Image (cartoon, grey):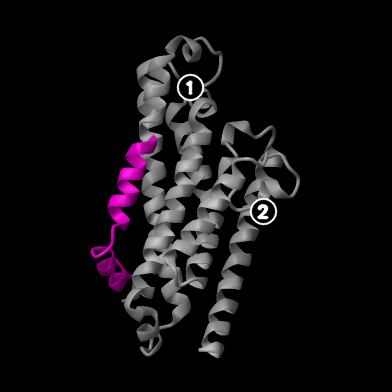
Amino acid sequence: MILALEMKKLKRTGFLPAIFLGSLFACTFPPANTALRPELFVQQKLPATEILLNANGQMLSMVNLLLTVLGACILYHAEFSGSGIKKMNTLPVNQNLLFFHKTLLLLLGLAAAVILESCCLGFCAVHWFPSEEKLLLHLAQHTGYTFFLLVPAALLMMLIALSFENMWVTLGIGVICVFVSTMIPTDTSILGYFPFVLPFRLLFGVQDDEALILSLCICLAEIWVLMFIEILLQKLRRKLS
């Protein structure tokens, strides 16, 4: 019921056009970059997906994070405008479920964006690396890994959006987090696992299986911690209201 209601609300927002246009914008980088310097990439003795991600992965990750920030702002701005969130509190609706359904919509939008970007990478691989083997497997691994590392950032942004009624405050915090994260090396012991830094970890940049498993485990732990913080925050808001 709540999910159906949230999907109806999306029609009155720019969430879907923002995600779609942002994804298309991200998809312009790999073909443009490869077309301008094809000899630089074709001559490398690496899997096509790895070559393309080494050249475009950081930019795609930053666009995905900006889409995360924008999507969270739009989803909760629809609630705070016109005191909609206060009206929802008077209804027999679990606010935790409201948060998780909004987060689910954001994750679905991000999943669509990541899949579209992977299709673009696949097009570049087929066009410039026609003899590439295991292309579909590499793209599937990249898509799943990239999306999973976006989940903590999405949860954190939704928590920030939930905490501030002013959308511009949420947007400002999100943009600052994105650009600060671009300056933090992913191999830093602690800061490298900040939710906004995790998406910059590329699958083919992981040195060994232990590092890969560690990244996934920390990502999963952050998801549970952020969900727990959300439950505490909702209880605090009810007591203060």
Circles 2, 1 touching at the beta carbon (< 8 Å): no
Write down the quadrant of residue 210 in the picture: top right
Which of disc 1 and disc 2 is earlier in sequence? 1
Q: Amino acid at mark 1?
A: Ala
Query: What residue sits right under mark 2 in the picture?
Result: 218
- Residue 82: in sight, yes or no? yes
Question: Is 234 covered by the magenta stretch?
Answer: no
- 233 and 82: which is toward the camera: 82
On screen, residue 191 versus residue 173, left or right, reads right
On screen, residue 206 versus residue 125, left or right, reads right
x, y (%) of residue 225? Answer: 63, 66
Query: What residue sits right under mark 1 in the picture?
Result: 48
Q: Distance between the Cα atoms at labels 2 and 1?
A: 28 Å
x, y (%) of residue 182? Answer: 59, 41
**The residue tagged with tag 1: helix, strand or loop?**
helix
Tell me: residue 95, above or below residue 20: below
Residue at far right of view: 189
Stretch of the chain drawn in magenta: 3-26
Residue appearing at x 50%, y 12% in the figure: 40
Residue 92 image label: none
x, y (%) of residue 41? Answer: 49, 15
**The residue tagged with tag 2: helix, strand or loop?**
helix
Residue appearing at x 45%, y 80% in the figure: 95
On screen, residue 203 versus residue 113, left or right, reads right
> How many marks overall?
2
Task: Using a 10 Å C-alpha cutoff, classify the residue at mark 1 as few (fewer than 14 neighbours), some (14 to 19) or many (20 or more).
Answer: many
Q: Main secondary structure of the magenta part?
A: helix
